[in-house]
Structures are given as C-alpha cells and as structure tokens.
Image (spheres, grey):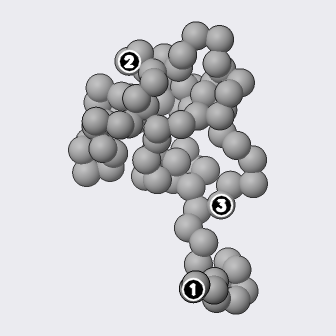
C-alpha cells in the first residue's frame, strides 16, 4: 500500500504525462470505463480539488504511477488473518 494518499493534482500530472491513462484513452483491460475517473471532465480533475485524494482509479493506473502495491506475504512478513 502507498503510505500517503495520492492527490488529484498528482494523478492529473501523471495522466497528462502518460496519455494512455487519460479517461477517454484508457484501455478497458486496465480500467472499468464506466467508473474510471468518474468525477473528472476528460483529463482534468474537478475544479478546486487538486489537493483532494484521487478517487475512481484502477489498481493498474495506480501501479502505473508508482503508487499501487499489492500486500503480499513477503511484504507483510506474516499472513493476513481470514475471518
């Protein structure tokens, strides 16, 4: 897991530098187009929300930006409990 929330501003810079992750260009294999960046207009985050946490992104997009990390046994050092 990423220790800090990723902001809309950070993610906006990422999608502008990596057009394949823009809302209208993302591959359906990597994001659910019905929900991906649902609150954004094209490749722009909602006005006045640059410092808000980004929402409606896929794990693949987070991973592409260097923020997504799966919690695995080797990362945790012990198994997660199953309830």
Q: Nearer the viewer, mark 2 or mark 1?
A: 1
Q: Earlier in the sequence, mark 2 or mark 1?
A: 2
SS state under label 1 = loop
> As rendered, which of 73 and 56 lies closer to the eye?
56
Q: Earlier in the sequence, mark 3 or mark 1?
A: 3
Residue at the extreme front: 83
**Which residue is disc 1 drawn over?**
82
Question: Does residue 19 appear anywhere in the picture?
Answer: no
Q: Quadrant of residue 80?
A: bottom right
Q: Earlier in the sequence, mark 2 or mark 3?
A: 3
> As rendered, which of 16 and 69 lies closer to the eye?
69
**Which residue is disc 3 drawn over?**
1
Picture quarter with the C terminus: bottom right
Q: Quadrant of residue 31?
A: top left
Residue at the extreme top: 47
Crowdedness of circle 2 by 10 Å Cα count: few (<14), some, many (20+)? few
Q: Which mark is residue 5?
A: none
> Residue 22 in the image: x percent, y percent?
38, 29
Crowdedness of circle 3 by 10 Å Cα count: few (<14), some, many (20+)? few
Which residue corresponds to the image point at 48% horizontal and 17% vertical from the top-left? 44
Measure how far apart labels 2 and 3 are at the Cα level: 27 Å
**Which residue is disc 2 drawn over?**
42
Which residue corresponds to the image point at 70% horizontal and 80% vertical from the top-left? 76
Measure how far apart labels 3 and 1 are at the Cα level: 19 Å
Picture quarter with the N terminus: bottom right
Which residue corresponds to the image point at 43% horizontal and 47% vertical from the top-left? 58
43 relative position to 79: left or right: left
> Residue 67 in the image: x percent, y percent?
61, 50
């Amino acid at each position: 897991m990423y220790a800090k929330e990723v902001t809309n501003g950070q993610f906006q810079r990422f999608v502008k530098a990596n057009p394949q992750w823009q809302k209208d260009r993302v591959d359906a294999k990597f994001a659910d187009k019905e929900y991906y960046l649902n609150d954004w207009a094209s490749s722009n985050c909602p006005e006045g929300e640059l410092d808000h946490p980004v929402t409606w992104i896929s794990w693949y997009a987070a991973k592409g930006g260097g923020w997504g990390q799966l919690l695995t046994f080797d990362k945790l050092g012990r198994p997660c409990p199953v309830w």
